[in-house]
Image: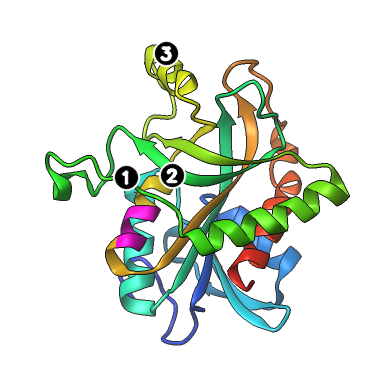
Amino acid sequence: MTVHIGAKPGEIAETVLLPGDPYRARWAAQTFLKDAVLVNEVRGMLAYTGTWKGERVTIHGTGMGMPSLSIYVNELIRDYGAQTLIRIGSAGALQHGVKVRDVVLAQACCTAGSPSRTIFRELNFAPTADFGLLRSAWEAGQTLADTRGIGLHAGAIYSSDTFYDERPDLSEQMQRHGVLAVEMEAAELYTLAARHGRRALAVLTISDHILTHEALPADQRETSFGDMVEIALTAAFA
C-alpha cells in the first residue's frame, strides 16, 4: 500500500492502462477484462486487475492533469513494479484532418510545463513514446481502421495543464507545426517512463475538435472509446 494506492503487493499487474476518469477505468475493466477485481478506491480513484486473453492487466485511474498522473505513475512504478504504462484517454483535435472519434497515437509530446520541468532546468526534454509499443499500436490500429473504418493518426501532441486555455496564439502555433491534438497527461507519463526505464504510450480518442467545436455528447464518451482500449491492450502484448 502507498499513500494514494490501497492495493496489496501483487495486486497490480506489470501492464497498466491509465484512463484519467476512474469511472472509465471501471467501464474498461468490466468491458475488456475477465475476472476483474477492484484493487484500489483510495480517494475515489478506482483500479481493477483482471486478465485479457490470459494476460494480467490493471486499469487504474489517474485523475486530470500531469500533477495527478505523476503521483499515481510514480507509485505504480516505484512501489508496484509497473513495466508497461499506456494512457487511454480523450483529446481535442488541432488539425482539420483529425476527426471526432478518430484515434491518435502520441509519438511525441510538447508541453509548456510539467511536474518534471524543474529537474531539467534549462534543457527542453523531448518526451517520446516507446517505439515498440507505438509500432504495435499502429499495426493494431491499422487492422481496426480496415475493418471498422476508424481514423488513425500518429504524431506529436500537446500536453497542457490548462483546460480552459486563454492562449489562442499558442494553439495556433501548435496547429502551424502539425501537432495533432491536445490532452493533459501524456508528457509527464513519457518523462517518468524514460526516467525509470519503463515502456509508455498514449492512445487517445478525439472527443472534441478545437477548430470546428464539434464534441461527443457526454453519454457517448465512454462507449465510443472501445477502439483505443483494444488497440492499447493489443499493443501491450504484441
Left of 28 or right of it: where is 48? left
Residue 4 % position (x, y): 35, 65
Residue 21 % position (x, y): 55, 50
Q: Is residue 126 visible?
A: yes
What secondary structure is found at the residue carrying circle 2? Answer: strand
What secondary structure is found at the residue carrying circle 1? Answer: loop
Q: Are marks 1 and 2 in contact (CB under 8 Å)?
A: yes
Q: Residue at x 51, y 79 (%)?
A: 13
Q: Residue furthest bottom?
A: 10
Question: Which quadrant of the view contains residue 62?
Answer: bottom left
Q: Which residue position holds label 2?
A: 108
Residue flagged by tag 2: what amino acid is it?
Answer: Ala
Q: Residue at x 65, y 34 (%)?
A: 207
Residue 43 % position (x, y): 42, 59
Q: Which residue position holds label 1?
A: 126
Q: Nearer the viewer, residue 165 or 63?
A: 165
Q: Residue at x 32, y 54 (%)?
A: 191
Q: Are marks 3 and 1 in contact (CB under 8 Å)?
A: no
Tell me which label, 2 or 3, sits earlier in the chain.
2
Total numbered labels placed on residues in the image: 3
- Above-or-below relation of 140 to 55: above
Q: Which residue position holds label 3?
A: 168
Q: Residues within 10 Å of mark 3 (few under 14, many from 20)?
A: few
Residue 193 lies in the magenta stretch: yes
Residue 175 % position (x, y): 49, 21
Residues under labels 3 and 1: Cα distance?
23 Å
Q: Residue at x 36, y 62 (%)?
A: 193
User: Magenta span covers which residues?
Assistant: 190-194
Tell me which label, 3 or 1, sits earlier in the chain.
1
What secondary structure is found at the residue carrying circle 3? Answer: helix
